[in-house]
Image (cartoon, rainbow, N blue to C red):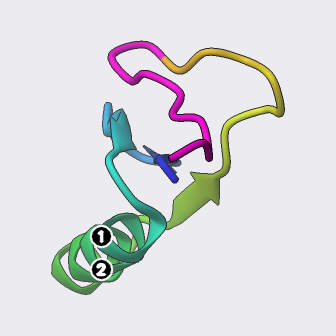
């Protein structure tokens, strides 16, 4: 599931392919810029995320 990461101090504001990677990038950013903090956000339910396609559970 994609997650959005947004920084309170700079222009970092992007969708990341999965939440695990988003969390890792957030921690790295906060470690590098100690006065910045990151907000992670899941996409709203039933809302399209730019650049991502929703996948169905059918197989």
Which type of secondary structure does the marked residue at label 2 adopt? helix
Image coordinates of residue 16 in percent, x first then y, are: 33, 47
> Which of the pair 57/25 is nearer the observer?
57
The single residue placed furthest to the front in the displayed view is 59
Residue 53 vs 17, above or below: the answer is: above
In the picture provided, is 59 more to the left or to the right than 46?
left
- Which residue appears farthest toward the right when viewing the image? 45
> Which segment is the magenta one?
50-59
Q: Residue at 36% across / 34% down in the picture? A: 14
Q: Nearer the viewer, residue 59 or 28?
A: 59
Residue marked by disc 1: 21
The quadrant in which residue 39 appears is: bottom right
Report x, y in % for residue 54: 53, 27
Indicate the quadrant where residue 28 lies.
bottom left
Q: Is residue 44 depicted above or below 7 in this figure? A: above
Contact between marks 2 and 1 (CB within 8 A): the answer is: yes
Q: Residue at x 51, y 34 (%)?
A: 55
Percent x, y of residue 6: 48, 44
Kindly indicate the quadrant of the structure image that contains residue 26. bottom left
Above or below — where is 34 with respect to 57?
A: below
| Circle 1 residues within 10 Å: few <14, some 14–19, many ≥20 | few
In the image as oriented, which residue stretches furthest toward the left? 32
Res. 24 mark: 2
User: Main SS type for the magenta part?
Assistant: loop
């Amino acid at each position: 599931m994609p997650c959005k990461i947004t920084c309170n101090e700079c222009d970092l504001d992007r969708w990341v392919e999965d939440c695990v990677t988003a969390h890792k990038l957030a921690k790295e950013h906060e470690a590098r810029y100690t006065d910045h903090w990151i907000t992670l956000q899941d996409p709203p339910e039933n809302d399209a995320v730019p650049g991502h396609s929703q996948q169905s559970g059918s197989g």
